[in-house]
Image (cartoon, grey):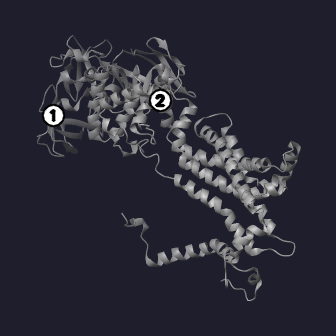
Amino acid sequence: MSQPLMVNRYRWYELIGIYAGILAFLTFILAPFVEGFLVSLKPLSQLFSSPYRFIPQNGSFEAYRTMWVSVPGFARYIFNSFFISTIVTAVVLMLVVPAAYAFARFKFRGSGHLLGAFLAVNMFSGAVLLIPLFRLMRSFGVLNTYFAIIVPGVAFLIPSAIWLLRTYMMRIPRELDEAAFVDGASHFYTLRRVILPIAMPGITVVAITTFIGSYAQQFIYALTFNSKTEYAPLPVGLFAYFGRQEVIWNELMAASFVGIAPAMIVIFFLQRYLVSGLTAGAVKQ
Amino acid sequence: MGQLNLNTVQKFYGTFEVLKGIDLEVKNGEFVVFVGPSGCGKSTLLRMIAGLDETSAGDILIDGKRVNDLPPVKRGIAMVFQSYALYPHMTVFENIAFPLRVEKMQEDKLKAKVENAARILHLDQRLQQKPGLLSGGQRQRVAIGRAIVREPKIFLFDEPLSNLDAALRADMRIELAKLHRQLKATMIYVTHDQVEAMTMADRIVVLNAGEIAQTGAPLELYHKPANMFVAGFIGNPKMNMLPVICKAVGATGVEIEFQGQTATIPVEGRAGLVGQPLTLGIRPEHIQFGAADLALAIAPSVIEHLGAHTVAYAAVNGEGENFCAMLPGSAAIRTEETVPVGLKAADCHLFDADGIALERRLELGDVDMGLLKAGGV
């Protein structure tokens, strides 16, 4: 069982090469995080010392306490980020699951063009459309609300979610739909009782990417469509650590780490549903 | 009741005619097998009866009612798919109960029905397991269970055994035949395997290129194939075809010439055959050692020893086509050694230039005539 497959056997120099490659890339990816974490441990005075030391001397978790004091609204920002992402994810899933099923299963006029259009929308970054969106929001009178941050978030996350889930659903054997149809089930009944449970790993992937996507992209919408502090999400809220004279770097870093914690926890729980092999036994492959 | 009528049923994909006007009547309680090579339209026909594919033209009637535009469940059919199509996240119980859940049947009635179906199919011990834990044969039985709980008028099977291994397939054939006797329901079964067709069917419908080549009881197709296609398709190994010339048509049959020998084949002749090239068909199992009404010398290139039989393949007339002879298991033959074999005129089939059979005057003393009557239910 623990014996590696023949195709997975490598010579010693191949192994060294592989691990060297992994190390090089991991360094690039993880170094900013490590440095960010080290900064959060240092007292502010040490940050600009010369020569620069990476390892903090008399480092402490003090910044993780003072960050709540210097920016009292910080908990609210975390909540906002979390709240916005959760709502965006929920709305996207509600819209995307039936849509992906339709795109995966039914032939209808223009389905190919629609999918192409979704892909094209994905190529525009939301930033390009900020000014038209701003005008739109203003005419609707929804600036400075959660709504203004959530709706564009949903709109820009739907296309990739549809593509992802459609591909997953296309892998579910069509005979399952046909069998349910022969047994008298309606399309919605089939979707609910048959397709949804089998597509759960795919839906989880979509939920995770949407949640992360929303977490990352809400910054630009919140910055443009919202000027009220109470609706500001985490990335905007972090600016509060930029004082008039100085930037409280250590607290900023600490706040960044604390801020992404809820998202990490959600993803950790969602990942449990990423069970592969759920379709085992459905059809003879 | 489960009477099915097809009236000139056609199917087009674009301009391509997949089914060219199928007429068929299936009686209540009959086990009918559609058989034919891949792409002959047999699965399409079944899916049209099921209501999964649309009918381009013609009528499908179940118990005298036109069902062309009805969804499957309103037609009173149930279907078993080649790939089982089980719901992997549901237990065997829930899989079988699925059609009843759709109907919103009461829990106690539902439970009784599912358990009854499970008993018939020997799945009692497996009800709480998921399909992933079952073997191929058990999965297929679950699929059949899902079909029988609804008590449909007509069962449709789309190559249900082709995913099973050979031993299991033989077992399931027997179980399906038993199930048919037990349920007394109309069953329509699609397969490309002529052994399945021969063993289970009351009546076989042989399809070729979107048309019915012949309809009849298994032994009728074996003894009296209507054309060269059916003759070649039914029977394993395939019937041998030899080119002959018609010399005379008489009261006792048709006299033919083959490699300088003449023989009178007991078939119904007709005018205008004399001098025409005909095709003589002889099944491998009807070839015997030594000369008979017609004699041949074969030098087998390949010999298969099956124990019960010895199958020899050889070229006749120096032609590349494999002439196949099924000889006794103990036959003393070697490759590349010429042996004389013969065929009896009474075993021969004759086909005209269009491949249509001249009807055999069969003396079937050893065949139960009842088995030859189609649809003897």
**Seen in the image, is A260 located left or right of residue B349?**
right
Return the x and y of residue A159 as percentages of the image width and height: 69, 47
- Which of B302/B37 is in front? B37
Q: Is the residue marked by circle 2 packed among few (<14), some (14-19), or many (20+) residues within 10 Å?
A: some
Which element carries disc 2, helix, strand or loop?
Answer: helix
Residue at image mark 1: B341
- The residue positioned 87% from the left and 44% from the top of the image is A141
Between circles 2 and 1, the one closer to the viewer is 2
Residue B264 drawn above or below residue A104: above
| Percent position of residue B29, x then y | 34, 17
Above or below, A27 relative to B63: below
Query: Which of the 4 image quarters holds residue A234?
Result: bottom right
Of A227 and A28, which appears nearest the observer? A227
Nearer the observer, B7 or B360: B7
Q: Is residue B30 visible?
A: yes
Q: Which residue is rendered at x = 62% and y = 61% of the image?
A: A264
| Image location of residue A202, percent across then percent down | 56, 49
Q: Which mark is residue B101?
A: 2
- Quadrant including the C terminus of chain B: top left
Q: How many residues crowd mark 1 within 10 Å: few (<14), some (14–19), many (20+)?
A: some
Q: Chain of mark 1?
A: B
* Residue B172 vertical placement versus A78 (above, below): above
